[in-house]
Amino acid sequence: MLLSFLLSGFLALNPFAAPLRVPLAPAAPGVVAGSIDPCRIYGSVYLERDPSRRSYCFATVYLEPESAFCDLLVYPETNKLFADRAGLWYSTEARDFADYALFVTDNRNLADFSFQYTKVRNYAGCQKR
C-alpha cells in the first residue's frame, strides 16, 4: 500500500512531461507595455489628492488647463449608469465605491495621462493625435 501511494505521488508530479508553453499575446501597436490607456477608463471615479495614498491608486493623472494638450476629455455624469464609455466619469465621494481611484498631481511630468472636463457630452473621449 505504501509503495502504490509513493508511486502515485511520483506520477502525479509527472517529471517526464514537457513544460506547458503559454503563448504570449502581442502588444497592441502604439501602446507601450505597462502604460495606462486612458481610453479604457470610464464609470465611477474617485480623484485622490492626498500624496500619502498615492500607492493605492490605479493611475496618476494631471488636470490639464487647456483642452488642446490633454489626452482625454471627460464629461462629468450625474448618474453612474450613464458613465458607460470612455470619457464619461461619475465622481464618487467614497473611494470604496469607485471603479477607479486616480491620484491627481500638480506636476505634469509625473502623470500617466492628462484630462480636462468638458461641458458637452459628445466631445468626451480620447483625443486623436
Image (tube, rainbow, N blue to C red):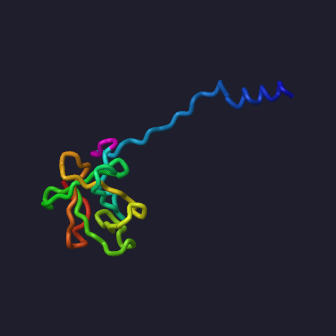
Residue at screen point 25% across, 53% down: 61
Q: Nearer the viewer, residue 25 or 68?
A: 68
Queried whether the magenta region covers residue 31, the answer comes back as: yes
Residue 114: x %, y % from top left: 22, 55
Q: Position of residue 28 (x, y in %)?
A: 34, 46
Which SS does the magenta portion mostly show? loop
In this image, 4 relative to 22: left or right?
right
* Quadrant in the picture for residue 43: bottom left
Residue shown at 34%/61% (left/top)? 46
The residue depicted at 50 percent of the width and 37 percent of the height is 22
Q: Which residues are magenta?
A: 30-34
- Location of residue 100 by image quarter: bottom left
- List x then y, in percent, for residue 18: 59, 28
Taking the spot 25% from the left edge, 55% from the top edge, the residue there is 104
The answer to whether residue 13 is left or right of residue 56 is: right
Q: Is residue 81 above or below residue 61?
A: below
Q: From what the image shows, is residue 4 above or below residue 124?
A: above
Screen quadrant of the N terminus: top right
